[in-house]
Image (spheres, rainbow, N blue to C red):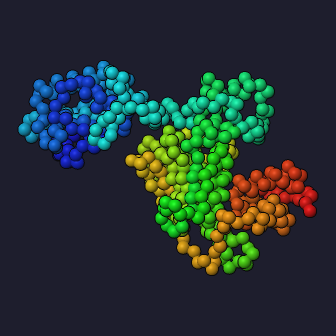
Amino acid sequence: MNFQPILSKVALGEDSTRQFKADVRNVESLASEMAAFANSNGGKIFIGVADDGSIPGLSAGDVSRINQLISNAASQQIRSPLTVQTENVALANGRVVIVLTVPKGIDKPYFDKNGVIWLKTGADKRRINSKEELRRLFQISGQFHADELPTKAGIDRLDKLRFRDFLRDFYKLDFPDSSSELTRLLQNMNLATENGMLNLAGVLMFAERPEWIQPQFVLKAIRFPGNQVHVSEYVDTEDFSGPISKVFDDSLAFIMRNLHKIQAGRGVNSPGTLEIPNSVFEELVVNAIVHRDYFVSAPIRLFIFDNRIEIISPGHLPNNLTVDKIRTGISNIRNPILVSYVAKGLLPYHGLGSGIKRALELWPQIDFTDDRDGCLFTVIVHRNSIDKSEATASSPKSSPKSSPKIEIQILDLIRKTPSITTEQLGVKLNKSKRTVLKQIAKLKKQNLLQRVGAPKGGHWKILGFE
């Protein structure tokens, strides 16, 4: 690096990647600056540059002394030791600027010799002073994740029927006979801690009433009139709690009942087509539940307006992930236990990083806002203006008796078209694929429906329905 690049860097001022120091004499202070950079994303310290951007430089004696301080700080004053780089840049007046490069740490967190962990906050640094911040730092470094958090819920809080069905359907296992066997199984499945308590993932997926144990992890949904948030006016509102599969089903149903159904030239008795494909919201709601930051004690919020639908998740994008990157399908796993179980069929999950991309392919009118200061990630699904003569909206207060039960509708459609697919049933019924599959499973259990042949190319057979 020569003098001109230094001038251009200095002209930009200090920020979270650049620090100026006219001189260095305190090795402990230097070590804390280096630890803060290593615990964040790395950066450069320009020694010989004053805070106001002037460049007094260093004498030859200063350079020798400070390079010794740097070596001492990196190897003796920080745990674990850091490997840093220095470059001496000559100024026109014969003095020198030392450019100290601190890499992003690969063994976070880094402590100073007093056991203090430092983080960069803009151009300054600060101590970590809460368990939540420490846990998040461990999360960033891949050493700990929020869904591993221990809870105060014992295995007696498990929804035994829900967990039994999951064991049977995915692992082909029977529910354990004894509590000791159940505890050991939950620990092996990474759903319980060493002391036999459920971890957060176990609570969110399989506890009988997760909201009694972790009341903050729910989903709050509101349908507002118009396009602004109202303090007291709303058309429809509901809080969704329970295991994450129930939260998903209920919140998706809330969205569906508040979307317009477009007739598009069909008869008035036709159920119409949803203004936005329901698969878009399947992807986005799953993404919000699975990838939210569970270190933040706040609910997911779902706001429906006339011109848009907002899904607001606690926690900004993790690590170096950006909106541009997620649009291309790049993703980071924030909650690996939840992801692994959702991928086993707990929710309609199609693979890491593919959900956002698939939603955009189905409905390109989606914006994303990553609010790092507010620690929020917002998805905004824009709605097209609808010709009211061509659309109907489901009333939140309409009676379920106003239309035939979904099982009857499914059987009626199958009777007309035995080769119909579950995807086609979902489109015709304006229901999610997951809902259709649940109803088909119920009909099979009642010996009313049978699948003949392969999933592709086969057909349905109605066994006995009057």
Q: How far across and down, in percent of the image, does residue 59 sit?
A: 10, 30
Of residues 132 and 453, the one nearer the viewer is 132
Which quarter shows the C terminus? Answer: bottom right
- The residue located at (41%, 48%) in the rendering is 374
* Residue 296 seen: yes
Of residues 392 and 284, the one nearer the viewer is 392
Residue 151 in the image: above or below residue 390: above
Looking at the image, residue 231 sits to the left or right of residue 77; the answer is: right
- The residue located at (18%, 29%) in the rendering is 24
Q: Quadrant of residue 69?
A: top left
Looking at the image, residue 26 sits to the left or right of residue 425; the answer is: left
Total numbered labels: 0
Residue 266 in the image: above or below residue 397: below
Q: How far across and down, in percent of the image, does residue 423 sit?
A: 72, 60
The outermost residue toward the top is 76
The outermost residue toward the left is 93
Q: Quadrant of residue 207?
A: top right
Q: How far across and down, in percent of the image, does residue 290 sit?
A: 58, 45
- The residue located at (20%, 44%) in the rendering is 10
Which quarter shows the N terminus? Answer: top left
Q: How far across and down, in percent of the image, does residue 200 sit?
A: 59, 35
- The residue located at (16%, 43%) in the rendering is 52
Q: Quadrant of residue 320?
A: top left
* Residue 97 seen: no
Looking at the image, residue 135 sits to the left or right of residue 420; the answer is: left
